[in-house]
Image (cartoon, coloured by chain):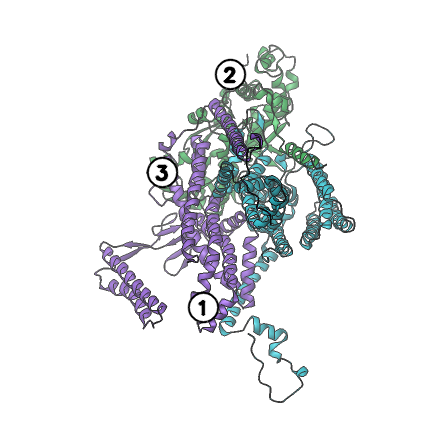
Chain colours: A cyan, B purple, C green
Amino acid sequence: MSARPPGVTTPIEPSEIRPPSSEVGAMGWLRHNLFNSKSSGIATIVVGLVVALAAWKLLEWAIFDARTGVITTNMRLFLVGLYPQDEIYRVWVTMLTLSVMTGLTAGRMRSGAVRMMAIMLAAGQVAIAFLAIVSGMGFVGAAAMVANAVLLLMAMTAAKRWPLSRRWMLLGWAVTAIAATLLLQGLGESSLLPGVSTNVWGGLLLTMLLSTAGIALSFPFGVALAVGRRSHLPVIRLLSTVFIEVIRAVPLITILFMAALMFPLFLPEGIRVENVFRAIGGITIFSAAYVAENVRGGLQAIPRGQVEAAQAIGLRSWQTNLYIVLPQALRITIPANVGLFISLLKDTTLVAIIGLLELLGIGRAVLAQPEWIGASFEVYLFVAAIFFVLSYTLSQASYRLEKELGIGER
Amino acid sequence: MTEPQSDRRSTASVPFYRDVRVLAVFSQVIVLAVVLLVLGYLFNNLYSAMAEKGFLPSLSWLGLTAGFEIAETVVPYDSTHTYSDALLVGLLNTLMVSVVGIFLATLLGLVIGIARLSKNWLVNKLALGYVELFRNTPLLVQLFVIYFVVFLQLPGVRESITLPGSVYLSQRGIFMPRPQLASDGWIWLTIVVVGIVVAALVWSAAWRREAAGRPANGLRPISLLILFGVPIVSWFLMAAAPVTFEEPVLGKFNLTGGLKFTPEFAALTLGLALYTAAFIAEIIRGGIEAVSKGQLEAARAIGLKESETLRLVVLPQALRIIIPPLTSQYLNLIKNSSLALAIGYADLFNVSRTISEQTGQPVAVIIIVMSVYLVISLLTSLVMNIYNRAVQIHER
Amino acid sequence: MKRLVPGLVIGALVLGSSAVYAQAGGRLAEVQSRGQLVCGVNGGLPGMSVLNADTGLYEGMDGDYCRAVAAAVLGDANAVEFRTLTADQRATAIQGGEVDVIFRNTTNTLSRDASWGDFGPTIFYDGQGMMTRADLGATTLEDLDGATICVTSGTTTEQNLADQMSFRGLTYEPVVAAEIDSVYGTYEEGRCDAVTSDRSQLVGRRSTFANPDDHVILDVVMSKEPLAPLTAHGDDQWTDVVTWVVNSTMEAEELGITSANIGEFAGGENPVVQRLLGETGELGSLLGLSNTFVVDVISSVGNYGEIYDRAFGPDTALALERGPNALWTNGGLMYSPPFR
């Protein structure tokens, strides 16, 4: 609907016809996008002034008033909580393994979105290394983070050329998961790997642990529930439906309180489960219901013909589900589940209310230190910024993934 | 073309342990038994642990005196009321936050959603920035910022910011005049209600005329005249002003009298609204964008004005797409209102925490609270489903 | 191979869930086999329990008593895992067995004794007080009529406040928060005119304020608040252990035994001291502890007076008079039953 160029009176060669200068270049852009009508022009000026004022105020605050010391002196707390200084190498080692595995996985996938996520992860590690140096946390940690990023990218490049089989990848991930848990938690009394109580896990480390463990553990439950909800067996359908609907109807915080306070009462005498794992349990139950609904959506999108074809070649109903329906359905639901992971990541902040020191909880603890009372904006801004970067990157990647998978275009 | 295979093959040759129908019943019995056993085991542990420690769950505490005050109540309440009254106060507070929050979130979401469709680059990007900022940070962090960084940093009560119309803004909350019906104010109120009804009738008459293809003949201005004219004229015809305003007055510690919103309420409502609006905006944008271009072109082709196109063509179709996801956002807002605990607003969950500590009845209390949330969610879904059915295409 | 992967995953989950199995035979045996005492503390209360960021330990009276119990039971005062609890988490934490003992400035009351668990001896006699801004000029509760008052939810304080104000016919507006940091944070920001809590807590938190002198603690005591350790119902042996560890610190102070001079008392003549330090008799084994558990306690955390002075003594920022917390021989209420 662009405006017609002004009338041309003298005949000239078509190739010489150029739009008037008001239609191209910076001026044209301004005209089209900011001042294309009177009301639009007014809106531009008003909104522009407000934005400029707000930006100026924020900049002024950031330069003159912000007490950035509250972040830099407490950087270690923000990153790993009270994890003992002497044992911190274990966090680095764990991350190193995870980086390599991520690189290998991303490299063998043909998905640009996954690679983008991996590259962003590497960039994030370099950023943390930068933060670590700035806040005087020591060069060892910073070097470890940079090494992480490099290894990740190297693993990705290597895997692009020599992709490992899916079987080996799964095995690798399983081993990594066990090794990471063992390494971080230690082996009780042993002198080689003294136990590190999960009570001292905190900060970004705990946030990542809660959200990844939450989504990974809830996935099988969610899939089972989704299949159960579509089952033709009334009892199984009813049980699944009731579970899904009840969990989705109550707030996460009530489930977390149940997990944190009442869970011990449900267990037999003498069995204690640590706080962190109870929170993971609560998050798992909660997100399983949401995974189930995502997967159900995916299941419904599978054309009936697929099932009929499977039956025609004589597959049993569980075989049909396992080999035909589920793989297709899960593929479709990947973006939805990435979305769920993002909201789970943000929702882990709720464990701060039940006394766990994840990123926000650490922020609150830092604010209780006498010397940093009143620095709440600095702390909350920092916490919000970390979540924003994680969440925004993931959502962009998910958006690309959605396009790659061609969802919504069939 | 072969015979289509039937599920009901003859069972004569199949032994019972491979008979699909037997297996179906059998597997269901097994699943049910396992679920019941696990639940039974867990609850048995719970029961024996609690019996041993001498606090079996009961409901007798509901009638006991609560003994604690609640700052904000919709219904009369003080520390001599019972625990069940306290729970009711909490529930009403939850509902109040939810209703106000949903209203504000929808309004703001609509504005931002439309701004996202603006051709003005700055407005468009600003709306996008808003959406990304609020969607990608945790609600709890936003609540803390709004409560601790915005509301608690407002000036003290004696240095309140005074807005026109006797509205005061301070860290003690938002104070404004409270409208009160004078002794014979109900007469005026009745006249106003009648006026509104008449105005609505006239407006719908105009609508019907237009729908039938006849001109509305200025019925709309008449309707508006009735709507605003009747209350104003009758106000001055009354002997005394039918509605008076109780102004907040600065007492020794606080502003007293007038209508008051505490910072906790304001922060929670505002936080929920700002957060949810970002999601609603995207839903509304998606809904409007999903209306096919052909519809717009057709509307223009038959000469509808821009506003008519929006009202008669775009919105009815967009609504169909918008309602289901909007419903889940409303439900999310209601559930998220339980974060009141973090900033000290006395909602259902917060009150229940105090009660469960005082009575030593955590299990009974949490079951009551979860059931209430379940009922609220189901009722909200029900209402929205009815509305959804009303706006869907009625296929004949 | 295909079977191996799910197996490994399940293995990881089981390992990861890290359930801790305890042995039968009560809490004492459980703590001993675990090798660590799980102790519930406040965590944000100067004088009672506050985190020392360098050592990762909680310091203060509650923190020290956790360490004293660990010293008696395990012989190692550092074998403590601290759990920070909010006020409204205490009941379920002790009932559910999540913590072995709670030293978290918890007031002993009839209803709590009946429904929460068993209380040990009082380690601090406190009373509810009221702190307010100096510039408001209030000196009595009556001066606070119509004020906004910050209070911690789920505490006796919250109920006492309602009682005291309605008894005097005063109105107020409560601002209730669950976390102690929030309570004082909102008060300091000016959201409330006054904040009410145990007087020791008010003194402790005031010392962390930016301008402590801008706040006064009214000269009113609104209630009795005997702060005592809490153990779960139904385990008498364990409750006895906690009780007598606390008693031993008071007995040691009465006898003049400190962490510094305890060596000089070894092999002494006084039969009372000999029994206390386990040189004669089998008092410790009656509780299921070593006979010399008192030596472990006193040499690692000191006697009651030492614990008090580290937390509230004249050299601390709090500088709180002993008052009712002096020994009975000095006109206070601290009194240990005899060790015999």
Same chain check for tags 2 and 1? no
CA separation in Å, label 2 and label 1: 89 Å
Location of residue B5 in the rendering, given as x and y in whole percent from the top left corner: 57, 44
**At which x and y percent is residue B75?**
34, 44
Q: Chain of mark 3?
A: B
CA separation in Å, label 3 and label 1: 51 Å
The quadrant where residue B19 appears: top right
Q: Earlier in the sequence, mark 3 or mark 1?
A: 3
- Disc 1: CA contacts within 10 A as few (<14), some (14-19) or many (>=20): some
The amino acid marked with disc number 2 is Pro
Image quadrant holding the C terminus of chain A, namely bottom right
Residue A196 is left or right of residue C157, and the answer is: right
Instruction: Give the structural element (helix, strand or loop) at label 2.
Output: loop
- Three-letter residue code for mark 1: Thr
**Residue B373: horizontal and vertical position, in percent?**
44, 42
Disc 3 is placed on an element classified as: helix
Residue A362 appearing in the image: yes
Say which residue label 2 marks. Answer: C337
Amino acid type shown at disc 3: Asp
Position above or below: A115 against A281 = below
- Compared to residue B282, the image places residue A135 above or below, namely above
Residue at mark 1: B309
Residue bearing the label numbered 3: B85
